[in-house]
Amino acid sequence: MRVTSVETTELFTGTTEQPRQVVAVGLSHTPGRTVRLTLEGPGLTGTTETAVGEDGTARAEIPVTGDGLVPGDRREITVTATDGDEITTRTGEFTAAEPGWTMFMVSHFHYDPVWWNTQGAYTETWDVADDPATTGLPARTFDSRGQSGMSLVRAHCDLARRDPAYTFVLAEVDYLKPYWDAFPEERAFLRQLIRTGRVEIMGGTYNEPNTNLTGAEATIRNALYGDGFQRGIIGASPETAWQLDAFGHDPQFPGLMADAGVTSSSWARGPFHQWGPTLSVFGEEPRDPGRMQFPAEFSWLAPSGRGLLTAYMVNHYGAGWAIDNAPTLPEAEAAALTLFQRLKKVALTRNVLLPVGGDYAPPCRWVMDIHRDWNARYVWPRFISAIPRDFFAAVRAQLAEEGRTASPQTRDMNPVYTGKDVSYIDTKQAQRHGETRLADAEAWATLASLLTGHAYPDAALDKAWRQLVYGAHHDAITGSESDQVYIDLMTGWRELHDLAESVHADATQVLADQVAPATARTWSSSTPRPGHGGTC
């Protein structure tokens, strides 16, 4: 019999009032034997029993009771294995960990209606998502269709029907509105999920716009149309600007969103690399996020002084999707623990946000099993299915309790993406020209309506603004879309231009008609004009 390893973990059993840190012990012995393990050290005790497996090995967890420990304290320990008269020992070092940590697993999917396919294709109602929880099929596929926004919303809702503890996020209006319109029978259930805190409607904007390529008015309208639908139609209360994939924001973005009633934000594109500081390319090992210059949670401020409590997704918005690839629950839990250990290094408080999802991702097959099994075995760290509102509330509560504040950051940390500001240059020109023309047209139409009683062209302006908001998407105006999407988008920008031009011309003509008759009466052909001393 031999004790092969003694390892301190960050896991705690027991209760929240009396947590007991776990020491993991490896053992090699005769298959089928039961071994008693005892741990001793200065002020430390612990004991457990374990059965040796058929392969002649065992891994046991010893809950440790200790006095006067502070996180980071180190003490030498001895583990003794006993089987009848056979006894063996091994020494190791115990390092006290910090209890009280929670990882909030936020189930979500990211959806791009203007990436490699059109919104028309992505909002087909006949497509049915392959839900891994019921079919056992691969959870994520990229075939010629992908998975439609309709089927993805349905897949997450169906899991919520089966599992009353499942929570998830719904965000962009460009898939949420088509689902709401196509399936009115689902509205009551969706509202129930919102009411009971099992789904959080995120965003506060129509889509995830790339606001460093548009003007401020386009950002404001994006918020008006997004918040208007989410709050006014669905009955939700969007609190977080969920800008996962946007390639950049103008400096005023957090201030504008704060003015729109949003209190927090979360996004993935940031410093060091487009996938974040921990992810690498070409199969390299993940990098240490400790090289970040400030915590993952911070106060993102605009030049106006207004801002949002922000959670930067250090491992990108697909971080938790690695869990789905695990073939068994223990391996999925091990993957979750690895993610936690990586992310906690840069957390501002004892709370970690783990987005569990990805592009066009149905529910993760393991997230609810982890939620139940892990927390049944360990009191800390807790791994829970949650929504961002829960996470931000926990961060704020700990900061308030400790009398701390999040560090202020005023810069846009998104990197410059090669080509995104110059590829498909006509998309930038069409968007900016349309925005400028539309703002002028709206102003002139307002004057014409107020001064002459001319009918205000609300329908034309509304559609034009919607086309402009749609084109501000981070995969549209940036030029990162496929050729078929580009053609589809250009028709929208053309309609925007024509509507704005028509409204502008109509309004200016109405106003000109009011001025021209008066001018003609004042300066007739027989009336001398000042400075001319004669007839015209």
Image (cartoon, rainbow, N blue to C red):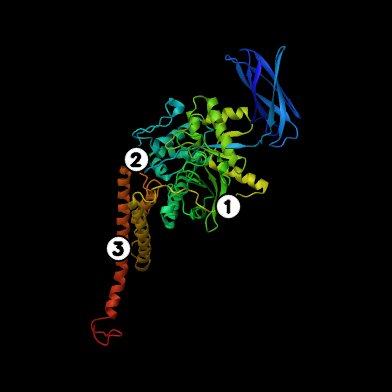
User: How busy is the neighbourhood of tag 1: few (under 14 within 10 Å), some, or many (20 plus)?
Assistant: some
Please name the residue that numbered disc 1 is placed on: 408
Residue 360 percent across, percent down from the top left: 42, 37
- Tag nearer the camera, 1 or 2: 1
Compared with 476, 377 (above or below) is above
- Tag nearer the camera, 3 or 2: 2
- Quarter occupied by residue 338: top right
Can the viewer see residue 123 in this picture? no
State which tag comes first along the sequence, 1 or 2: 2
Q: Amino acid at mark 2?
A: Asn
Location of the N terminus by quadrant is top right
Please name the residue that numbered disc 2 is placed on: 117
User: How busy is the neighbourhood of tag 2: few (under 14 within 10 Å), some, or many (20 plus)?
Assistant: many
In the rendered structure, the answer to whether residue 449 lies left or right of residue 167 reads: left
Residue 88 percent across, percent down from the top left: 70, 17
Q: Amino acid at mark 1?
A: Pro
Residue 445 percent across, percent down from the top left: 35, 63
* Residue drawn where x is 65% and y is 37% of the image: 100
State which tag comes first along the sequence, 3 or 2: 2
User: How busy is the neighbourhood of tag 3: few (under 14 within 10 Å), some, or many (20 plus)?
Assistant: some
Q: Amino acid at mark 3?
A: Ala
How far apart marks 1 and 2 lie (CA) works out to: 39 Å
Residue 166 percent across, percent down from the top left: 52, 33
- Quarter occupied by residue 39: top right
Q: Which secondary structure, mark 3?
A: helix
Please name the residue that numbered disc 3 is placed on: 505
- Tag nearer the camera, 3 or 1: 1
- Quarter occupied by residue 296: top right
Compared with 108, 233 (above or below) is below
How far apart marks 3 and 2 lie (CA) works out to: 35 Å
Location of the C terminus by quadrant is bottom left
| Disc number placed over residue 461 in the picture, else none | none
